[in-house]
Image: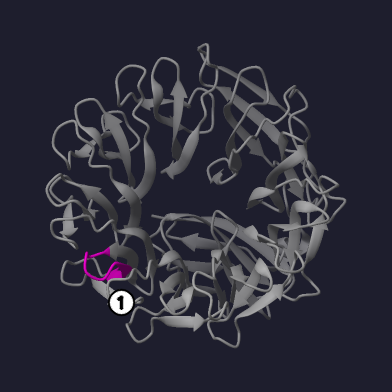
Amino acid sequence: MKQFFTIILCFAALYTIAQPVPVFTGFDLNTGASQNSDPYYFTQLGNKFVFNTKTDATGAELWISDGTTAGTTMLKDIYAGANGGFPSEFTPISGKLVFVATDAANGQELWITDGTTAGTQLLKDIYPGATNSGPEELTAYNGKVYFNASDGINGRELWVTDGTTAGTLMLKDIRPGGNSFPDFFTECNGKLFFKADDGINGAELWITDGTTAGTSMLKNIAAGSTAGDPYLPFAVGNTLYFRAFTSTEGFELWKSDGTTAGTQMIKDINPGVPNGFNGSEFISYNGKVYFQGTDATNGEELWVTDGTAAGTQLVKDINTGAGDGDARYYCVYNNKLYFHAYDATNGYELWTSDGTPAGTQLFKDLVPGTNGSFPNYLIVYRKHLYFTAWQASNDRQIWISDGTVAGTKVVAPPVSPNTNPLQLSELKFVYSQDSALYFSAKYTSAGRELWSMKDTTTYLNINTITKNNFSLYPNPNNGTFTLVLDNNNFTTGTLQVYDALGRRVHEQSITDKTQTIRLQQPAGNYWVKLQLDDAVLTKQVVVE
């Protein structure tokens, strides 16, 4: 029988802005000898969420939860016995989830679930028999899911599904007789971009409108058979930013508007040095895109671009000289950019930036000395910034910050006897039904299990109460929804949308009490932040 334990740490106070001490709830899902259930791949489905977790008896299988102990159960034992079906890549489609899982008869194939045991089924055995078709890179676009898979005849190619067996088919054989390996699917400007290798031009940037005829190479970036190898695409509005290779510039910063002419290098950041730019982890902040860029003088550091060569600049040489500052794990909180970075004095620590060199500085030295705390998995949950970091050597914990040095500290249930309870656990899933943050941790002798952390504080202020409130509909939606305000009692209004990693992905001015929002982002959970004069309100919206 499953055990569960809840530790109430404090009561919420009305009209407070004080830092919360959350309520922690643990779920002991694996009571076998190994103890650890290692939950992962959390994804909301209707008013519940599914995830991958293991027991000694079943291996890693598909589970479902409504946030309660009684409502947290195995949904289906896909691979009978202790082997485990290892479900992953849950992707929304028409109120259901398409995912990848393995069973003995069919190997690793495409599955679908509606949240019931009977409605959890093999969608299609793409590679007939027990051989894996290995579906990868599942991505929602225009009501369908796109991915790559191998049917044993055509190699690993571009596939699509509408959630039915008949509607699951190869969209295009990009490389006849070989593997085109389509991946890095990213929706932008109404199209789906991806990387693929047609066997003639190498791995280049491709685009599709969802039809076979409308699927083509967008640009041969490297020219000839050399691969342009477009990498880590990031969509902001109607522009796709990415890293790509040419023989004369090496890897550099590129952008695309979905046209061949509009697909071009923004700037040669490290002139004359092949493979000089190793940029990664793009984030949108204050109307610009920040990223990790590399040049010979400064190493890997924090850069910014507005999409022009002149507006693409080093923000700050954090680790002075040619050594790497290694700025990454970005998150926007309280209109500042937070990230992990390295300098020779403090090691890897938490940094912050307002986009200026002077405003880019060490936020807090969590572990004094050169070893560093290695903060990562930053996420904005309700009114605070949360992340994981070392508290001391080999002791990774959850930290909370209100944006002040004094208000940045470890938060954990007081019963925890264990050091390093988080290890590499990610803080990425907020379940909208109970507004709790779910993750994996080893806080007790019950092993590495499912935990939730809930901020029960009621955040209200006089402006929120007297000025306005708002609603979003439909919710869930396909990316287009309507904002409705209670009244027009405001002078200035701005709406911002943040993804589950805290990245701002959309911003627009609000001028009326009813306004349409068109969010060009993949399916997932997003936070809408509405600022009306000096009042700030937030709600979650789900894109399917």
Q: Position of residue 402 (x, y in %)?
A: 78, 53
x 46%, y 40%: residue? 41
Q: Image height check: is 310 above or below 474?
A: below
**Count of residue discs:** 1
Q: Quadrant of residue 447?
A: top right
- Going by the image, does 452 lie left or right of 120? right
* One can see residue 319 in this view: yes
The picture quadrant where one finds residue 63 is top left
Question: Whole-percent x and y of residue 23?
Answer: 70, 34
Was residue 206 drawn as part of the magenta stretch in this picture? yes
Q: Is residue 32 left or right of residue 259?
A: right
> Can the viewer see residue 237?
no
Q: Position of residue 45 (x, y in %)?
A: 41, 42
Q: Nearer the viewer, residue 291 or 65?
A: 291
Residue range of the region highlighted in magenta in the rendering = 197-207
SS at badge 1: loop
Residue of label 1: 220
Left or right: residue 430 compared with residue 250: right
Q: Could you classify mark 1 by the number of other residues whose Cα lies within 10 Å: few (under 14), some (14-19), or many (20 or more)? A: many
The three-letter code of the residue at mark 1 reads: Asn
In the foreground, 481 or 396 = 396
| Residue 130 vertical position relative to residue 491 in the rendered view, above or below | above
The residue shown at (41%, 56%) is 523
Residue at (34, 29) in percent of width and height: 85
